[in-house]
Structures are given as structure tokens and as C-alpha cells.
Amino acid sequence: MTKPVILTGDRTTGPLHIGHYAGSLKTRLERQDSHEQFLLLADTQALTDNAHDPDKVRRSVLEVALDYLAVGIDPAKSTICLQSHLPALAELSMLYLNFVTVARLERNPTIKDEIRARGFGRDIPAGFLCYPAAQAADITGFRATVVPVGEDQAPLIEQTNEIVRRINAVAGQSVLPEARAVIPKAGRLPGIDGKAKMSKSGGNAIALSASPDQIAAAVRAMFTDPGHLRVSDPGRVEGNVVFTYLDAFDEDHTGVAALKAQYQRGGLGDEVIKRRLDGVLQALIGPIRARRAELARDPGHVLDVIRQGTEMARARTQDTHRAVVDALGLFRL
Amino acid sequence: MTKPVILTGDRTTGPLHIGHYAGSLKTRLERQDSHEQFLLLADTQALTDNAHDPDKVRRSVLEVALDYLAVGIDPAKSTICLQSHLPALAELSMLYLNFVTVARLERNPTIKDEIRARGFGRDIPAGFLCYPAAQAADITGFRATVVPVGEDQAPLIEQTNEIVRRINAVAGQSVLPEARAVIPKAGRLPGIDGKAKMSKSGGNAIALSASPDQIAAAVRAMFTDPGHLRVSDPGRVEGNVVFTYLDAFDEDHTGVAALKAQYQRGGLGDEVIKRRLDGVLQALIGPIRARRAELARDPGHVLDVIRQGTEMARARTQDTHRAVVDALGLFRL
């Protein structure tokens, strides 16, 4: 039996953080054997809202690839590839734009939210409005049927499937498979300040390359329960970032449950739970940081990994492009 | 001195007609020696409003190429190439979409008019709204500085230059040249029914491959002056399609001027001027039709012409794409 094909990846806008680890990298590690997995270094998509700063997008390519390898992504099992070097994806994107209306893109809830979040106002780059079609190209280009996405991004997969159905209808055959969104149970990890989204630009993230001091400082600054003034006071566990992170990263679930109970009763200081979390995060990040530093000493090797993966991905995406062109009966020289 | 680079071409939505000949093909023939000329078989752009009928777009590729060769485009002087087989154009298009806002595209007068003319309503294909960015990719991909366009399309060149200036600004260097619209003095040839635009779909065109009978029938059906009932009546020359075509195709300008004077005074029947136009058009189209029929017997040769031109164009457009990527400082594997 062939393995299901999974497409995942990250926009190259900065090094990854523990939010990425909890939300996606961990699952990717688990799926390396059971799935045919493609990890897309999405530098082209990163440009859709970073065209003014191509430098950041370039620099981040190697950073993200380093993060992948450092957490244990194995290039022999998973294919790491670079979006900008897969011209068939641009070709499919341009084609798909003809199979979706402007009104439909504007109605996409994910795009609506993101336009608001980015404060584009009327100055929405066309590339940004159109990125769902590009994402449809990514997903279908690899013939992926499983796409892990955050809950807020599920409408993008619906958009992809609409395009797929339209192409298949015009082609009169099922040339492209539909894809299924897989939404992680874990949910999105909040930033250390308790804000909904951890992000490098938000200054509320802990990078996978964070130093011991950076980790310690982040834990010290972490949002807990502002009403929990004295150790003896009862404290809140919901919205308390330290407990959210312990839930995500501490494997001793019974121990964490006991701490939560004690914290809610009163008699447990923030310092104790923060010390525990610091230990957990140091143990998680320490080995990643060490592997990352070692890999960073040999960028040629990392480049080779990207090159080889991109070569494989190029063949795959070109095959798909050709199949779509032929199914639609377009001209082939 | 290097020759100026000119980009021109046609959407592959059907064989070309004498409107194309008067409006652009004739000028292209004249510029074969003085310019480095690229003729783009624009099948990708044709899909932006023909995604439901890819068959028509495919079939028309060879038709348009045959028309080019039949009128005398010389592949040794001009490069005939196929848009869908130039992936660098898709890559540049996707990149440029990040340098233009949705609002700007919606404000483009050409796009506004064309959206109205096509009756898209709210269902504008995203690819159609975005085609000015794709056209900017075409123009800059070839580093064209001269672009012949109809008067109504001049805003598209302005749009191209805006993107060029934005890219150059972010790159901090002049990596792309601006282009200049060249608007033909002749103006657009009306259809045989007197409607503003000759088009195959409008049923008011005379194809470059028209048979003698088709030419004769078209001239017979041609709109003249509905008020010119008897030969002795004075007739109108303005808006009289027969005279418009005589102006465009009859090289005996003095003769045409004399006929016009007589027609306006009265005493000249439609039959006479139509007979003259029929002779002119038969003489124009006859040799084109003959060459076209001969070329059509060897489609392998036509394919070779397109293949070789596309190969040259691929190298040129890839060079440009690489130059832009490097100037912007994007990642290069």
C-alpha cells in the first residue's frame, strides 16, 4: 500500500519557535514513517506580505531548514524543498487563478482575518489575496491528500478542493485528488505574554535555538495569574501560560495535574511552577540547540539537503503540472 | 548598436483576421529588421477568460502561428514563442503580484472596461483581474522597451512601469527597464457590420484564411450608409465600412479619394465600391491563404518554429527572472 501524501511547511520569515514544535513539528516527526511527507520552505508565500523585505525571507530559508533538521526531520524519510525553486507551482498557481473568482477569494474567512490582522486596509497586495490559489497549487502539486493546518486555516483547504473540483469538471476526469485538512488536537500555543499567537515579530516567542539564558528569561517573564499575589492565594490555571506550556511539553501528566490542583487551592508559588517549566524547556531545547549549532557549522550540508529535496519535488510537481495540462487539453510542445 | 526589443503577440483564441493585419501584423513585418522582435502566442493569457474552453485555446495556438508565418513573419528575424512553455513568466507573474495592490488592479481603466465588456459581473476570475501583472512579466521578461498596444491598452503599460519602479526601488538598483507603449496611428479596424471591434466571436470579421467566397460574402454584407438608397443619392463616407477598409488596404490613395468625393456628391453605387474592395481584399488575402495552406500541410515545421523560438525565449526570460531574484536578494540554490 502506498503511504498517504502529506504536505506541510513554513513561511520563511524567521527561525521557528516552540509554538511550531508543539503545533506541527512534533507531529511531523511522528509521521515520518507512516506518510510520504513533503516539507515546503515557503519563501514565495512569505513574499506575499514581505515584498518590502526580501532579505528577511532569504535569510530565513536556511534558518527554517536548520530547525527542521535540528528537531529530527530526517531527509531520508521526509523531503525538504524550496518553494521558489519549483516553477511548476507558479505555473499551476497562474492556471488556478482562472478557476476562482475575486469575490470568492475576498469571502475566504482566513484571508479576511489575515487582511485585518496585517492592517493592509485597501492596500492588499494582489499576491496576498491570491495566495489561496497558490496554496492550492502547493497541495495539489504534490498530490497531497492530508494537509495539517491550524483551525483558522481550514477554509483554505475548502478553497483548494473547490478549485480541484472545477478543474476536474472542465477536464472531464479526476486528474487531481481532493485534500483533507487535519487540525491538530493541541490547538495553538499562546505567546509567553498570554496573547493568542506566539510569533517572533510579536516578541512573545521562545525560539528553538534559544540559549539557556533566553529560555530562563522567557519563563521568568511569563504570564501566569495576575490575581495570584501571595503563595497562599488560590490561583487560576486557565489562561496561565506556565500551565499551558506544562500541558504541552511536560510528559509527567500526573505530576502536572497535581500541581494544578495545588495551585488552584492555594499554597503553590509561581516560582515553583516556573522552575519546573524551565527544566522541561531546557531539556527539550538543549539537544535541539546543540544539533542546530553543529549543523550550522556545515551550511553546505544543509544546502545539499535542500537541493536534493527540491530536485525530487521538482520532478513530482512537474509531473502534476503536465497531467493537469494534458487533462485540460492544453497545448504541449 | 543593439536593436530595441519589442514584445507583441496575440491571445490564442482563434485565427487572426484582417483587423489584426491592419492593426499590428503589417507593422510587425516592417519592424523585423530594425527591432529584436518577440511574438508571444499568449495561450496562458487566453485562459484568463476562457478557462471553461481550454480546447479552443489549444487549437488556436497553431492557427495563430500559421497566420504569423503566412503573412510573412520570418522566424530567422522574429522569435515566435509559446507563453505557457515559459515558466519564468509564471514565476515573474507570481512575484509581481506582490508589488501591486488589489485596489490598483481594480482601478485599471482597461481592466474595468474589459470586465464590463465580458459581463463578468461579480464573477471575475482572479486570473483576469491579475493579468496586468502577468503582462508586466511578459514585457519585462523579454526586457522589451517597445510595446505596441491599442489605445485602450495603454494603461497596462503604465501598470507595468509602476511594478518595474517598485521592484527597482526595493532592489536598490535598476534591474528592469521601463517600457514605452507605441499606439498605431491606424486605429482599430471596425467589423464588417460597422461595430467598433472586429472579432471572430462577434461574427463580423474576415479571417486571414478566408476563402474567395467568404471574402465576397463579407463585402456584400458590409455596412455602408443606410441612407444611401439610390445610386444618385449623396452618401456618407464616415462610418462607411467599405471606405474605412479601402483607406486601410487600398494603396491607390488618390483613387480612393476620388471615389469618396463622387460618393458624397451622389452618383456612385455601393456595388462599385464593394467590387473595388473585393478586388483589394482578394489580392491581399489570396497569397496569405495560399502560403497558409501550404504551411498547414507541414505542421511539423510550424511546431519546430515554435519550439525553437520558445527555446530562445526560455533562455531570455529565465535570465531576467534570475536577475530579478538576485537583485531583490532572494534565495538562490
Image (tube, coloured by chain):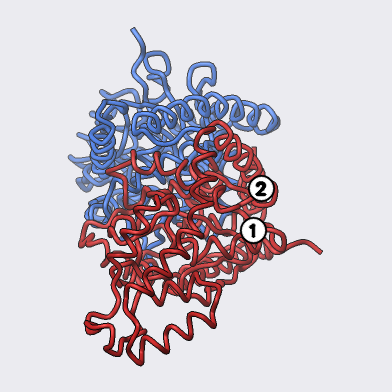
Chain colours: A red, B blue
Is residue A67 positioned above or below A167 on the image? above
Give the letter of the chain under mark 2: A
Answer yes or no: do the residues labelled 1 and 2 have beta carbons within 8 Å? yes
Same chain for the residues at labels 1 and 2, yes or no?
yes
User: At which x and y percent is residue B92?
Assistant: 41, 39
Find the distance from the CA under tag 1 to the CA under tag 2.
9 Å
Closer to the chain start, of discs 1 and 2, is: 1
- Viewer-nearest residue: B252 or A21: A21
- Name the residue at the left extreme: B265
Element type at mark 1: loop
**Which residue is rendered at x = 30% and y = 68% of the image?**
A222
User: At which x and y percent is residue A22?
Assistant: 49, 66
Residue A331 shown left or right of residue A51 in the figure: right
Residue A265 position by quadrant: bottom left
Residue B250 position by quadrant: top left
- Specify few, some or many for label 1: CA neighbours under 10 Å numbering under 14, 14-19, or 20 or more: many
The quarter of the rendered structure image containing the N terminus of chain A is bottom right
Is residue A51 positioned above or below A196 on the image? above
Is residue A283 positioned above or below B2 on the image? below
Give the letter of the chain under mark 1: A
Indicate the amino acid at tag 2: Arg
- Viewer-nearest residue: B133 or B329: B329
Indicate the amino acid at tag 1: Arg
The residue labelled by disc 1 is: A143
The residue labelled by disc 2 is: A316
- Viewer-nearest residue: A296 or B279: A296
Element type at mark 2: helix
- Specify few, some or many for label 2: CA neighbours under 10 Å numbering under 14, 14-19, or 20 or more: some
- Name the residue at the bottom extreme: A265
Residue A28 shown left or right of residue A34 in the figure: left
Residue A313 shown left or right of residue A68 in the figure: right
